[in-house]
Amino acid sequence: MAYTTTCNNIATNNKISTTIDSKCNSKDSGIKYHTLNQIHTESRDKQKLFKIPNFPKNSVFFIILAILAESFIIYASVLVKLTDMSPINLGFYRIALALPIFWLMANTRRNVFKIPLRDITYMMVAGIFFAFDLLFFNIALRHTSVANVNLFASLVCFILIPIGIFFFKERFRKSLIIGAIIAFFGILILVGGKGKLSVATPFGDFMAFLSVLCFSCFLGVIYSLRKRYGTLEIMFFACIGSSLVLLVLALMFEGFEVPKDMKDFGIIMLISLCGQVIGQGFFNYIMGKVNTQTSSLVLLFSPIIAALMGFFILDEKLGILEVCGICIILIGVYFAKKESY
């Protein structure tokens, strides 16, 4: 009887010891897993080119970044007027020169060619929209002022907001209708009120409007992709789609051109760096940090920045009616956006 009791005690002690060891091992495994996970996270963070603090979505920080990105894009549009290269060729060079930069930056994060083919196709479709945006944009800059081209860019909210409502289930606002009516009257005054010193033409304004349509479609596709992919991956494949389309169009309508001298090449490099890498790259990054309504709000500042750059750099002057038209359009955009917050 005593022997049986002793055996039972030994068995119980062994079971308790096994349980304790199991718990210790489990605890050690948990610590090891947590440590390995932390090391993996740190190494992944080190692979990032830069780290931005975790600001809330639609914060003032991202709105300021969007305005800065838009300023670089506008500066690139000013530089377009300083080169004699044909519009389609210029668009091709802007994309092609940025392509290696996006590829190098994207490959530091992941192998971009492991992205599913379906999503790559969407990215390239976005690039096709952007190619036609650049085509009409560059043509418009030869026939109208920098201020007018970027003024029409601020109207993107009237296209982008409906895209957000129908495709991304964002809330519809009645103020959009009021703003659209006011902006439409502003456009009529702007187009019909060309002063003697104005460099704008109705044809140039129409090209700017077509550019806005294509740019809105580009932003709509980008907005859906930014929820799953980073800016660099999207811009890399979008640039491939854009460059292929622009190269074909250039060969068909203009013939392939090369910069006439180093100064011309330097201007084209600046257009690519400011307009595509810094401007569009940052703006498309911000598309994942704000909703479609907030992103279109920042375009409200485009005409003001463009008018100042056009006046100080290119000595472009606006007539009184053109200024009135711009003010009315800005009021319309304000009414369209005032319920965003």
Image (tube, rainbow, N blue to C red):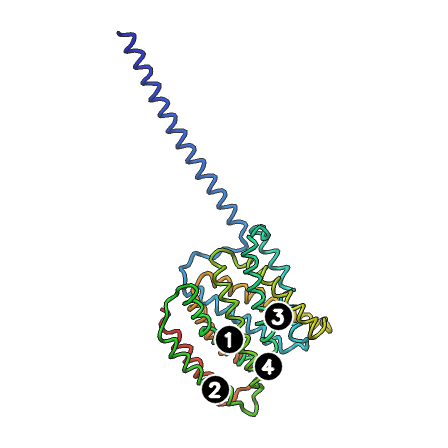
Q: Which mark is residue 314?
A: 4
- Looking at the image, tell me whether mark 4 or mark 3 is earlier in sequence order: 3
Q: Are the two marked residues, 4 and 2, in contact with CB atoms closer than 8 angstroms?
A: no
Callout in the foreground (1, 2):
2
Q: Rounded to the nearest whole Å, what is the CA distance between mark 4 and mark 2?
A: 25 Å
Three-letter code, disc 4: Leu
Q: Which mark is residue 153?
A: 1
Q: Secondary structure at mark 1?
A: helix
Three-letter code, disc 3: Ile
Q: Residues within 10 Å of mark 2 (few under 14, many from 20)?
A: few
Residue 125: x %, y % from top left: 56, 63
Q: Is residue 11 left or right of residue 113?
A: left
- Looking at the image, tell me whether mark 4 or mark 2 is earlier in sequence order: 2
Above or below 51: residue 206: below
Callout in the foreground (4, 3):
3
Three-letter code, disc 2: Leu
Callout in the foreground (3, 1):
1
Of 323 and 337, the residue lying toward us: 337
Q: Rounded to the nearest whole Å, what is the CA distance between mark 3 and mark 1?
A: 18 Å
Q: Secondary structure at mark 2?
A: helix
Q: Which mark is residue 188?
A: 2
Callout in the foreground (2, 3):
2
Question: Which residue occupies 57% across, 68% down?
Answer: 130
Residue 242: x %, y % from top left: 61, 66
- Residue picked out by circle 3: 271
Of 210 and 94, the residue lying toward us: 210
- Looking at the image, tell me whether mark 1 or mark 2 is earlier in sequence order: 1
